[in-house]
Image (cartoon, rainbow, N blue to C red):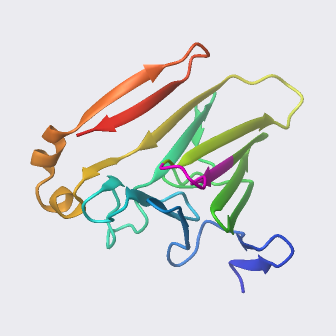
Amino acid sequence: MRFGYFDDERREYVITTPETPYPWINYLGTEDFFSLISHRAGGYCFYRDARLRRLLRYRYNNVPTDVGGRYFYINDGGDVWSPSHAPVGAALDCYECRHGLGYTRISGERRGIRAELLFLVPPGHTAEIHQLKLRNTDSWPRTIKLFSFVEWCLWNAHDDMTNYQRNFSTGEVEIQRDDAGGCTLYHTT
């Protein structure tokens, strides 16, 4: 196989390049909450029903393929890239995706900055967790700006594809900030 291999010891499929012919998907989920995530962080998640309770937008037959998902942009002094390769497409010095049972880990490195992403749906929870770790592997200090991005579907996937403007008007987002400078987004309808 030229795109990856099975790691039997860790029970993972390892994808060694972001440039596969089609998205390679992992399924994450619990009793009520499910996510589909590709090796380039594309895909969507939903609560109980993939058509009527979709949270993230994903266009199946889009050109280019695998557009829409959960992305992180790293701005390293004007050099903007994504550890998942998508959506920026900047060349990476190192890339790896590990699809495991209930999680996906994607790591990318560029110009001395290593990024490790973890995506999972914890058992018993109705949430998708994203964890990003950055590490400077060079000997000089860096100034990094980090941005995240998701594209909301706002529940009804069919209406979202056929009547986006109406769907866009029915959702509400609440932002709760914490003392550490982070925030949590809540989508309500």
The quarter of the picture where residue 181 lies is: top right
> What residue lies at 15% left-to-right and 59% top-to-bottom?
159
Q: Is residue 70 above or below residue 44?
A: above
Q: Residue furthest bottom?
A: 1
Is residue 125 in the magenta section? Answer: yes
Where is 15 relative to 88, above or below?
A: below
Image quadrant assignment for residue 24: bottom right
Q: Looking at the picture, does residue 89 appear above or below residue 184?
A: below
x 22%, y 57%: residue: 156
Residue 7 covered by magenta stretch? no
Residue for point 90% across, 29% down:
139
For this view, does 174 lie left or right of residue 95? left
Q: Which residues are magenta?
A: 117-126
User: Toward the viewer: 3 or 42?
Assistant: 42
Q: Quadrant of the C terminus?
A: top left
Residue 59, image x and y in percent? 31, 65
Q: The N terminus lies in which quarter of the figure? A: bottom right
Image point (43%, 65%), residue name: 66
Q: Looking at the picture, how far across and down is residue 113, in whole percent?
A: 75, 39
